[in-house]
Image: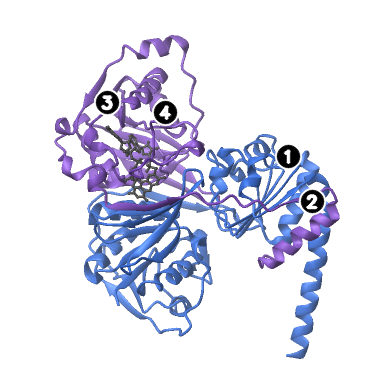
Chain colours: A blue, B purple
Amino acid sequence: MAKVVALVDRDARDTHDGTVPRSAYALLTLARRFGEPVAAVGGAGPLDQAAIDTLGRYGATEIWCPAEMSEPAGSTDLLQHLAARLAPAAILIPATPGGQETAARLAVRLDSGIITDAIDVLPGPDGGPVAIQRCLAGSYLVESTVIRGVPIITVRPEAAAPEPHPHPVTPAVCFAEVEPSPTPSPEIVATPKPAAGRPALDDADIVVAGGRGIGSRAAFAVLAEVADVLGAAVAGSHTAAELGWVPREAHIGLTGKTVQPGLYIACGVSGSVRHRAGMQGAKTVVAIGDDAAAPIFTMADLGVVGDAQAILPALLAELRARKAQLSARKAEDRKFR
Amino acid sequence: MKIVVLTKHVPQAVGEVSYADDLTVDRSAVRCRLQDGDEYAVEQALRIAARRLDVQVTALTMGPAGALAALRSALALGADEGVHVLDAALHGCDAPATSLVLAAACRRLGFDLVLCGTASADGAMAVIPAMLAERLGVPALCQCDRLRTDEDRIHARRDDGCVVEDLTATMPAVLSVTDRSGEPRYPRFEAIAEARHKLVRTWTLADLGVDAGRVGLAAAATAVHRVTRPDPRPATIPGTDPAAAAIRIADFLSERQFL
Ligand SMILES: Cc1cc2nc3c(=O)[nH]c(=O)nc-3n(C[C@H](O)[C@@H](O)[C@H](O)COP(=O)(O)OP(=O)(O)OC[C@H]3O[C@@H](n4cnc5c(N)ncnc54)[C@H](O)[C@@H]3O)c2cc1C
Ligand SMILES: Nc1ncnc2c1ncn2[C@@H]1O[C@H](COP(=O)(O)O)[C@@H](O)[C@H]1O
């Protein structure tokens, strides 16, 4: 069976379980559909045993890292090396800003086709990968394949629900003597921002967003409480940011942030094309607003036509009650175990 | 100092675009304009030009005849001259081919800095800047919020909400800007008229020495097999009773395992 390489791009912002980013689980889950999954680990520092075990749990049979060399090799260099060495059926890369850059460079070096921002990857009639993209402001689903070179596909991290492999494997850890590229790269000094109590917008599985329809800063505070009960990040439309209800970094849309959460709850947001451009990748959308004709409802899995200012407090109370029930039930379970 | 700014002509309302029979974007059916993201790149070029005397700003586009309008917009904003790569063989270029042609044009022009937007409004791949840098053998600084040049180096900052990165590279380099980099100016009315008299050169593939067999739909390394319009999913309920609406939403969230 041909190998499928999944890039595990480690950096400070996206690590989970210590050292492996969440996107790695999804990529390995997808890779298993059409080949033998192999993890290519870029980024700084040695891999610890916990990370190796995690990758094995998601089915990685091999883990490739660059060997210690005087010149550190980047992810692109590692993948270029593995493309030649393993002749994989595909290379899957997380669709993060860094991942897009890696994929772009790799496509040029390998003279391969590239498909970006896949929301799903399926085995095609010949067993090779078929990528599904949502294009043109989400209005079309496009199925395409790479027809030259090693298929390079950047994948939205939420494309597949991560499923551990039914038979976890013990991965072989391999070191590759990777030739660093002569192309100069910029010097980068990274400074992490202080962590907020809420999940970062980029990583959040749930995003609760408000727009002009929320009406006031006080009502926006209720929305933030709903977000806290759900463990969600808070965001806003362009207008909400202009009114100062959310910080500028939390403005979703063509001119702001793009998010692809599992769940997007839009409250008092009309859903202009520009706003939708920033959230069309959401798997599930719930919309609450008083204008049934607002475009946000065309993409809602559940739309509620009513006054967001009245519904949010009721929703907050309902969610708190259910959470309380859930934790009571869990406490019961523990007693009987 | 020579700055090349990439300017793409894209459909005005991406939501209205449809696909042609050959499964490429049907650009003839919709109105197009210089894309917003590239206006920010033009703006940064002009800000650099305002701070030093030796700057020449060239707007570059690759696109069908209508793409000239994107160049005219960039020239009205203040770019000095334009280059339009126009060749029937380019129809249907994929990203690697587009970057091949743009790289050839940049090389022919000569450059210290290539400025561009982060992502196209229509294709939205956000790969051209890095592909171009790779082909030109220069550093790429992608998705920058702020930038500053000194004699021969470029300094930039980007912020993804969790980490702030300060980037430094020696020019020549390719840099893409976000829309947080500074609001583009509006063209003065007279500037729009003046722009018509600025020099725009039209280059073909032959002018660039690019083999037509390496570009266009026939040479694309990806193939689109099917384009479908997903059904809208109308699942709308009235929310006149807030308590009932809250229960319905909470039910939905637990069905989908978000609670
Ligand atoms: C929504 C979307 C998603 C895409 N996804 C991918 C992807 O995942 N991978 C990938 O490699 N490519 C991708 N592309 C590009 C795609 O693969 C192309 O091959 C596609 O089939 C043709 O793109 P287009 O419809 O933009 O074609 P065109 O309209 O022909 O445009 C392609 C490029 O060529 C220029 N051009 C067109 N005609 C001329 C001319 N006469 N003279 C000069 N320049 C010209 C255009 O300005 C544009 O930059 C995507 C494009 C879109 C719109
Ligand atoms: N045909 C083109 N002509 C000029 N610039 C382009 C073209 N295609 C892409 N670009 C530039 O590359 C950036 C990123 O494009 P993309 O990778 O297509 O999302 C855009 O913001 C433009 O500045």
Which residue is disc 3 drawn over? B83
| Number of residues whose C-alpha sits closer than 10 Å to that of mark 2, classed few (under 14), some (14–19) or many (20 or more) | many
| Badge 2 amino acid | Leu
Q: Which mark is residue B34?
A: 4
Q: Residues within 10 Å of mark 3 (few under 14, many from 20)?
A: many
Position of residue B238 relative to residue B6, above or below, is: below
> Could you say whether the residue bearing mark 2 is in a helix, strand or loop?
helix
Mark 4 vs mark 2, CA separation in Å = 41 Å
- Residue A85 in picture, x, y percent from top left: 22, 70
Question: Which quadrant, please, contains the N terminus of chain B?
Answer: top left
Amino acid under disc 1: Asp
Examine the image and state in which quarter residue A329 appears.
bottom right
Residue, disc 1: A291
Element under disc 1: loop
Residue identifier under label 2: A312
The residue sitting at the front extreme is B21
Whole-angstrom CA distance, mark 1 to mark 3, is: 47 Å
